[in-house]
Amino acid sequence: MKKRIKKLMWILLVIVAVLVVFAIIFINSKPFGALSSGERLERIKNSPNYKDGKFQNLSDTPQITGDKNALSMLWDFQFKKSKRVKPKSPIPSEKTDLLNLDRNEDILVWFGHSSLFIQLNGKRFLVDPVLNKPASPVPFYNRPFKGADNYTIEDIPEIDYLIITHDHWDHLDYKIALNLQSKVQKVICALGVGAHFERWGFAKDKLIEMDWYEEAALDSGFKVFCLPARHFSGRSIKPNQSLWASFLVQAPDFKFYAGGDSGYDAFYAEIGEKFGPIDIVFLDNGQYGANWKFIHMIPEEAAQAAQDLQAARALAVHSSKYVLSVHAWDDPLIRISKALENSSVNLITPKIGEKVFLKDSSQTFTKWWGEIN
């Protein structure tokens, strides 16, 4: 009996050892990116936003709020989320032919979640593209909703500027990045994110890597400004080793703001004072929860942020593609529509894939989420 128990214990130890080795190999594989080193790490250490070995928010920002720990939050996510976290029917969508667009058209196409295609004054921008990929490091977990997955990398044309707000899996996909390498002229990203791209084969001179409050001149009179967000970062077990950011792109006659993932904070009003009015803003409005209230905005906060930014038009993003929280899938759209109903901000609500004319403020959209359960 003792020999059998001893044998079972050895088998168990071997299994645990194999699993540990597998986990170490897995989290050190290419999709997880890389930590900064050399000149990049020195630049990070000299950043005013890097303290005590990691990047910090401008305001105190605990990731978990309330009286629940990570395990109880995971339990709630698995067993106590709304019965309507996923739509029962496919998300209504359209398929704009991006490959054959007239370069002179000033348009926007939303792919769901925070992924955007923007063509402005002859330049093409792609923001946080995940397209038809899962929001996780494994292909079988957290797939996009049906209808929100109808764009693939083959549908994407040549891109002048790829903008990555931060390195989380639902904003930066390894395979998408690899396949964009030959299509993208420049990558605009927050400080530290460039380490991932270099590990994936991108040339260093292809990267425009920025700290908060830095600016860079682009082609044809364009400028980009790296600005704060209130969030966190990390693709592996060591968090906050790269920066999270929002970006404002200024063309000679137009400005757009990609807010990335962010909780509400005073910097929105500061950005509005410096850069406003802003023609269109894309703001985090989904995957929020009471247990992480400082790192994502609830719809009413997103509405306030749009007004703080002095936005003419706003598109609420970070919704309609994945289950990353416990609220009903359409709650973000319902609530922000109500919150901005009588404001000076024109909330636009295009379907996924629908063409939005950037310089046509009279264009109207349906409340498409009301068509499905």
Image (spheres, grey):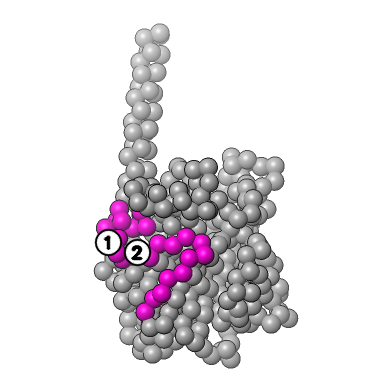
Q: Which residue is mark 1?
A: 203
Horizontal placement of 201 versus 276: left or right? Answer: left
Task: Choose top left, top right, bottom left or bottom right for residue 8.
Answer: top left
Q: Mark 1 and mark 2: span between their CA atoms?
A: 7 Å
Q: Which residue is mark 2?
A: 207
Q: Give the farthest residue toward the right.
A: 342
Q: Look at label 1 and name its amino acid.
A: Ala
Residue 12 visible in rendering: yes
Give the extent of the magenta segment. Answer: 194-219
SS class of the residue under badge 1? loop
Q: Nearer the viewer, residue 48 or 128?
A: 48
Residue 371, image x and y in percent?
59, 76
Residue 141, image x and y in percent?
44, 52
Q: Residue at x 64, y 74 (%)?
A: 273
Give the answer, above or below, for where 135 lies relative to 100.
Answer: above
Q: Residue at x 37, y 43 (%)?
A: 27
Q: Look at label 2 and name its amino acid.
A: Leu
Cβ atoms under marks 1 and 2 closer than 8 Å: yes
Q: Quadrant of the N terminus?
A: top left
SS class of the residue under badge 2? strand
Q: Residues within 10 Å of mark 1 (few under 14, many from 20)?
A: few
Residue 101, image x and y in percent?
36, 86
Q: Residue at x 35, y 75 (%)?
A: 160
Q: Residues within 10 Å of mark 2 (few under 14, many from 20)?
A: many
Q: Give the farthest residue toward the front.
A: 46
Q: Nearer the viewer, residue 7 or 173?
A: 173
Horizontal placement of 52 versus 102: left or right? Answer: right
Q: Residue at x 70, y 42 (%)?
A: 67
Give the answer, above or below, for where 79 lies relative to 128.
Answer: above
Residue 201 part of the magenta-drawn span: yes
